[in-house]
Structures are given as structure tokens and as C-alpha cells.
Amino acid sequence: MPNEKRKDEGVSEPWAHLRLPPFPQVAVRVLQLANKENVQLHQLSDLISSDPAFAAEVLTIANSMLYAPRYPASSILQAIAVLGATHLQGVCLTVGVRTYLGRSMNNPAMRALWRHNLATALIAEQLASGGWLDKDIAYTAGVMHDIGRLALATIRPKEFTHLLETHIGSASSILQCESDLFGLDHCEAGRRLIADWKLPVDFDDVVYAHHTPREKDAPWDIAGLIQVSCRLADTAGFAAFPGCEATPYAELLEELPAREKWLFHSDVESLAFEIGQKVNAVDPV
């Protein structure tokens, strides 16, 4: 079973020699500041506005059909008021990751990987809207869940792109391929990034455990939510690895708590269309 035991003793030798680009500092500081009690909206606004390019992307997302505000925001302060401080974290993480990916977004395989993250986040948000988990946290966790894979793909882009485009097999075999390439899989890499980039540690379990199978009757937690959302994204046509066989939609619906099944369409085509529109609102093709 992948990720059966955490490797907390020291830093793996291959990882110690990797030279990753830094995560955008505006995004890091927003995530840290938004987690503090009694944070003032103008503090968040001033911080985001200090980076015009970053601020422009946040405004674009806040004014997109994803949120469909009655009155479009013309300032970051207005955007924060529309989004709320908690959801702002997810939007800033979205912009931060896309900024981090930079030119690699021109690579079709990398773009597919990124859109898989967005689809997972949006499905997780929809699933959590039933009230059993916070939907803002669910969205942010969805964006975060494969951050280790996105980072690994920037280190050896040619080799990783080849893996993305040609791999046929199970999730566990993909994890093994990553370990062969880098000395660690993307789940462990995600945990290292949280520490190295000084991101909030809230999502450590998500990035590490989203490929660990849930026990049948285990209580639902955020990692389990992201795992099923990730598989739903694959089935809806947003697979990170197109060569992997997707789980049938009806089978995935049966895994959901009974009270949440009504949140989803009865057919996968309708889900794919709905999620596709939302993904395109955040990340225009």
C-alpha cells in the first residue's frame, strides 16, 4: 500500500539536491495572514495589491462566472468582500500555483495536470456543500492535493511529461515511477514543499494521504473527500494520467454518503460539462 508509513526522519537525499523555484511570496503571505485571528480585510487587500499582476488574476477569478457577483469588483478590497477571507485563500493558492508553473503551462501535459487539480478542487467544493465539511477548505485542499506532482514535473519536465503521456497502469504504479525518477513520490514531495515553502501545514494529511485507500466504514475526512473528488475528476475527463483507466461513474457515486449523492448529476456527461465550465472560468483554454 503506498504511503503506508511516513518518512519523518531527515530529508531524502535526492530531495536535498533539488533546486525548486520558490512559491510566489504574495500567495504564501496571504495564506499565512488569512489564518490569523482578527485579520483585517484591508491588510489582505494591501498585501495582494502590492503585486499588480497577482492582484489582476485574483480580480479576474472573483469576477468570473464561478462566483457571478451581482456587482463586479473593481478593487481587491471589494473582491475580498465578495469571496470572504476563507475562500480568498483558495483563490490566492490557485493564482500562486499557476504563477509558479509559469511557462510550463504551455506544455499540454502539464496543463492537463493543472486542470485536473482545478477539477478536483471544484468537485470537492461541490461535494462538501452538503454541509459535512467546509467547502472553502475542500476547494483549497483540492488545489493543494497534487502540488508535489506539479513541482516534480518542473524539475525534470521532459521525463515527467513522457511519464504523463505514456503511463498506463494503477495509481500505485505511478507513485513507483515517480519514486524511480526522483527518489520520492509526489505525496511525499508535497509534504516537503509545505515545509520548504513555509506554506500552512493544514493540508499535510491531504497531500500525503490522498492515495491511501479509505477503510470501508471509516468516517469521512478531508483526505477521503479529496481522494474521491480526484477520481471523479478523472472519470469526468480531467485525468492527470490519460493512460489510467477511470473508475465507472456509477461506482463512484455509490461511494458517496447517501445524503450527498443528490448533489451530483445522474450521468457523467452532465458533470463533465458543468465542471468544465467552472474550470474554464478559472483557467481559460
Image (spheres, rainbow, N blue to C red):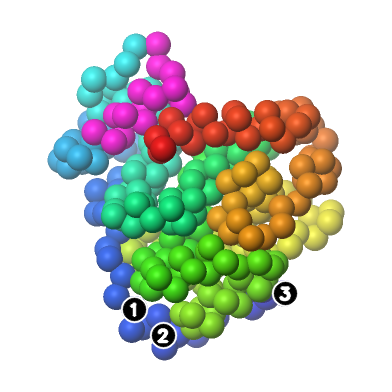
| Residue in the foreground of this view, choosing between 157 and 135 | 157
Q: Identify the residue shown where x is 29% and y is 53%.
A: 102
Placement of 71 over or under 81, stated as above or below: above
| Residue position for label 1 | 18
Q: Horizontal and vertical percent for residue 123?
A: 60, 39
| Residue position for label 2 | 14
Residue type at tag 3: Met
Q: Are marks 1 and 2 in contact (CB under 8 Å)?
A: yes
Quarter of the image containing the N terminus? bottom right
Residue 167 vs residue 72: left or right?
right
Disc marking residue 254: none
Quarter of the image containing the C terminus? top left
Residue type at tag 2: Pro
Q: Horizontal and vertical percent for residue 174?
A: 61, 70
| Residue position for label 3 | 1
Circle 2 SS class: helix
Place residue 212 in its image quadrant.
bottom right
Q: Identify the residue shown where x is 38% and y is 47%.
A: 93
Circle 1 SS class: loop
From which residue to which does the magenta span run?
56-70
Q: Horizontal and vertical percent for residue 10?
A: 44, 85
Counting other residues with Cα less than 10 Å from the Cα at mark 3, is it few (<14), some (14-19), or many (20 or more)?
few
Residue 60 vs residue 252: left or right?
left
- State yes or no: residue 66 in magenta: yes
| Residue in the foreground of this view, choosing between 29 and 140 | 140
Residue type at tag 1: Leu
Which badge, 3 or 2, is on the more N-terminal residue?
A: 3
Residue 187 vs residue 82: left or right?
right
